[in-house]
Amino acid sequence: MDKKFGENALILIWTVAVAATGGSLFYSEVMGYIPCQLCWIQRILMYPLVIIYGVALWKKNIDIALPGLILSGIGMAVSAYHYLVQKVPFFQEAGGACSGDVPCNVIYVNYFGFITIPFMAGTAFIIIFAAHVLLLKSKRK
């Protein structure tokens, strides 16, 4: 594996995880948006990625970041489902099933008519997952 590619990919992954974590904290703590249950699940999957990939970057070793690949894979699925709950009428009815103060079909932001918080989280999970897979493939060569 090209050392520079590996280090740059880890920097990208860690930066995306930090930005996603910071973004979620901004929306809840600064903007006052109360996270729904699916948002909390996505946070639980995203926040540890900052530590996992931070340590992998510090040690320059992608092998210790396998939990990050698993968490980001699950996060992609949760974010996709949450996005469907927000945007597809069939799934929107299921959004009211979330117990708690906020139903999962509430849309706090809707940039350009399609970019919601789960969309942003899903994009971050996809970037992290794809970059990790590319790192693993380049390592095998």
Image (cartoon, helix red, strand yellow):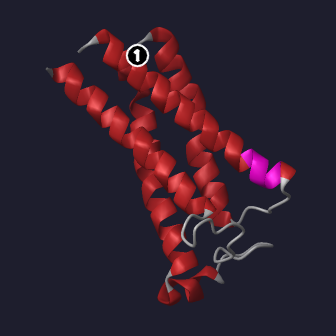
Residue 137 as seen in the image, left or right of residue 62: left
Q: Nearer the viewer, residue 125 or 65?
A: 125
Residue extending furthest front? 112
Figure label count: 1
Q: Main secondary structure of the magenta part?
A: helix
Q: What kind of residue is marked 1?
A: Glu
Query: Where the C terminus falls, by quadrant?
Result: top left
Q: Which residue is mark 1?
A: 7
**Residue 27 image position (x, y, % from top left):** 76, 54
Residue at image coords 49%, 83%? 88
Q: Is residue 134 above or below residue 114?
A: above
**Residue 5 image position (x, y, % from top left):** 32, 18
Residue 16: name its quadrant: top right
- Secondary structure, mark 1, is helix
Q: Can residue 26 be found in the magenta stretch?
A: yes
Give the crowd class for mark 1: few <14, some 14-19, many >=20 residues within 10 Å: some
Residue 14 as seen in the image, left or right of residue 105: left
**Residue 75 image position (x, y, % from top left):** 48, 52
Q: Can residue 54 be found in the magenta stretch?
A: no
Residue at image coords 62%, 65%? 111
Residue 70 shows in this picture: no
Q: Nearer the viewer, residue 67 or 39?
A: 39
Q: Nearer the viewer, residue 4 or 41?
A: 4
Residue 46 shows in this picture: yes
Residue at image coords 26%, 28%? 136
Query: Where the N terminus falls, by quadrant?
Result: top left
**Residue 92 image position (x, y, % from top left):** 57, 84
Q: Is residue 94 above or below residue 9?
A: below
Q: Which residues are magenta?
A: 25-29
